[in-house]
Image (cartoon, rainbow, N blue to C red):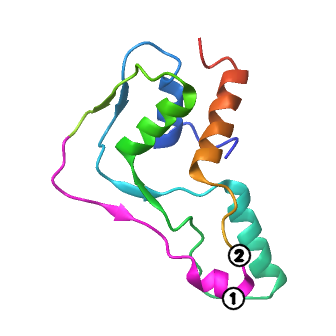
Amino acid sequence: GFGMAKENVLSEIISQLGIPGPIQIRQAAPIRDFVWKEDVVEGISKLVEANQAGIFNIGSGIGISIGQLAKKAICISGRRNKKVVSMQDSNSHSCLILDHTKITNTVGWQPKTTLSEALSLLINNSRNKEVFQ
């Protein structure tokens, strides 16, 4: 979401959209689950309001590889001529996807913001801050 750290994979991808050359990522293969910050806050709030304790996963439940994330950001930004370059090839396949069934069943929470919607918001916000040249 807005105000996220600059030292993460999504910030690094977005920061490269407005400069010449390819998007450089460390590894394309790892699969991660991305969730919008406001959706996380809503999930935590619902748990607090319902006085629920325990371990709950708050995620989208949908995984995307870092390489595909970069390609999706390129597509949304309209800079279709940009390429994605992985700096390291890896034979290991890291996959982190959260199952939010428990929180959904307990307090009815589900993420509302899709990855495409979130990327559009972040990319447009970056454009407004003149990150794009």
Task: Report whether 114 appears left or right of 52.
Answer: left
Residue 90 falls within the magenta-colored stretch: yes
Compared across the picture, whether 87 is left or right of 24 comes to left
The residue shown at (45%, 23%) is 80
Residue found 19% across the figure and 57% down from its top: 92
Amino acid at the residue labelled 2? Trp
Q: Residue at x 50, y 24 (%)?
A: 17
Q: Which residue is mark 1?
A: 106
- Image: magenta residue range: 89-108
Q: Are marks 1 and 2 in contact (CB under 8 Å)?
A: yes
Identify the amino acid type marked 1.
Thr
Whole-percent x and y of residue 124? Answer: 68, 30
When asked about the image quadrant of residue 42, the answer is bottom right
Position of residue 11 measured from the top left corner of the image (x, y, whole percent): 53, 37
Identify the secondary structure beneath mark 2: loop
Q: How packed is label 1: few (under 14 Cα within 10 Å), some, or many (20 or more)?
A: few
Report which residue position mark 2 lands on: 109
